């Protein structure tokens, strides 16, 4: 349907993927609106992974490799856009995968589980009948944390997370790595390590980075973490956007 | 459901309106994604109408008042977000209203007609059985132009239009006024008068402006048009966005 010659081919393919997933009942309608917001920011960023994002990716992987209990929290949009890569990343680190839906329904949780299993996941936390502990400061279904997953995790990768939940996870003392195309979002501003990039580019790059950083000593990984300044890194993305729009005055 | 205290209350209300309209079958799923893109740009613009946008609004209304056959082209998102205001504006100018859907289905056209009639429209062009002429350079349903509407119009207001159609309308010699939150979109860049703002703020402001400009002579209205430089006006919006993101380096 969409010609590969179209200047925005990749973006249109993702849009179609999301619309189909919505039709299949995996996503809530607000997930499509959220995807549109992401599209706009990605367009602004030139649909490219910036050097600042690469640095944040490297730091995020260092934190995950150093973690005692790293967990990848997966919502609908992340699963639809990059289930296979998420599963591969979880295998390489290794890290647990936990389902985390903002608009949680039993049907959607089942469909998410199926999607992740089809993508190769052997174990998925946060399923329908699973135990859960409440994340302090949150109410409703999104306050759920699996006792063996996010609850006891020291490092959590939460792509496309909402601001309240990111903040609650940081407040409970966890290192929160997020992937968010809006560098000014509360999630981006609150998280410990913010990767301002599109998940469809970031997760494959994270996989590549694991291969490299697995050869590093813990000391070297700690140095990467210590050198990283999240606020400064976000500033670089903000300036990138600023330059994109700047006109001669 | 949504607390009026929420810092992004208005935006959340619109999101809900769009999601409901989707459930009712008025909108295609890509309309929700398009709304999300708009949300992102509106957020970047501070959810405010800029002085540059106000100037474009004033110019757009001058063009409509000077027109022999002004037409307002209405798509799904515009109708859902501001049907009542569109109808009021069409009554005040006066201008015809024409339905124009990117993903045109008989059912969606019927629902659009009903929505516009419920909002007070007495006549709506572009209905199911209506005649239509092809806009040169376009194919498929979006090439439709009503012989008494867009086809013979000299000035067309097309909020939230796609790039191909905006370009085709301009190429056929019409003055095209658009409302688009992305100042870099092809629609924004191609149109004759580009209002970089949210339709929900723009249309009410256009109504206000009609009341003022109706007292102006044709000569005065022509002066407003002559003084306007669309490229320069768009640059102002771009710089506004650039400043929004700029960090000290």
Image (spheres, coloured by chain):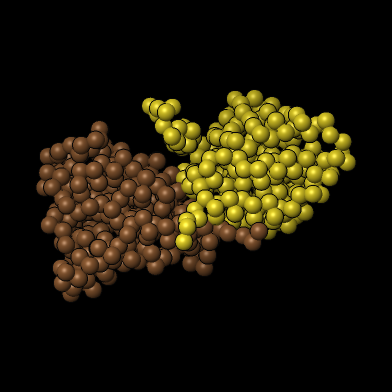
Chain colours: A yellow, B brown
> As drawn, which residue projects farthest toward the front?
A248
Relative to B197, B66 lies left or right? left
Q: Position of residue B44 (x, y in %)?
A: 50, 57
Q: Position of residue B18 (x, y in %)?
A: 39, 51
Q: Residue at x 24, y 35 (%)?
A: B137
Decide if residue A130 is in sight here.
no
Relative to B51, B63 lies left or right? left
How many numbered tags mark residues here? 0
Q: Residue at x 22, y 67 (%)?
A: B223
Q: Position of residue B228 (x, y in %)?
A: 30, 62
Q: Position of residue B27 (x, y in %)?
A: 34, 44
The front one of A223 and A122 is: A223
Q: Residue at x 15, y 68 (%)?
A: B218
Relative to A194, B208 lies left or right? left
Decide if residue A237 is in sight here.
yes
Q: Residue at x 21, y 60 (%)?
A: B63
Quadrant in the picture for the C terminus of chain B: bottom right
The front one of A44 and A184 is: A44
Q: Is residue B19 above or below residue B237?
A: above
């Amino acid at each position: 349907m969409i010609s590969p010659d179209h200047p925005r081919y990749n973006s249109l393919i993702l849009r179609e993927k999301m619309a189909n997933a919505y039709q299949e009942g995996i996503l809530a309608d607000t997930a499509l609106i959220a995807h549109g917001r992401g599209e706009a920011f990605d367009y602004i960023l030139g649909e490219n992974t910036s050097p600042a994002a690469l640095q944040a990716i490297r730091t995020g992987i260092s934190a995950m490799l150093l973690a005692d209990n790293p967990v990848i929290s997966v919502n609908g949009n992340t699963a639809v856009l990059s289930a296979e890569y998420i599963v591969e990343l979880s295998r390489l680190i290794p890290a647990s995968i936990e389902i985390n839906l903002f608009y949680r329904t039993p049907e959607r949780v089942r469909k998410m589980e199926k999607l992740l299993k089809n993508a190769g996941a052997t174990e998925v936390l946060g399923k329908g009948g699973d135990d859960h502990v409440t994340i302090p400061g949150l109410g409703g279904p999104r306050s759920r944390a699996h006792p063996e997953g996010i609850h006891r995790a020291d490092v959590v990768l939460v792509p496309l997370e909402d601001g309240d939940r990111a903040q609650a996870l940081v407040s409970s003392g966890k290192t929160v790595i997020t992937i968010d195309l809006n560098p000014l979002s509360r999630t981006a501003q609150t998280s410990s390590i913010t990767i301002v990039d599109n998940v469809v580019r970031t997760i494959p790059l994270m996989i590549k980075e694991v291969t490299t950083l697995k050869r590093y000593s813990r000391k070297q990984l700690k140095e990467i973490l210590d050198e990283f300044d999240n606020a400064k890194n976000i500033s670089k993305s903000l300036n990138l956007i600023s330059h994109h729009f700047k006109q001669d005055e």
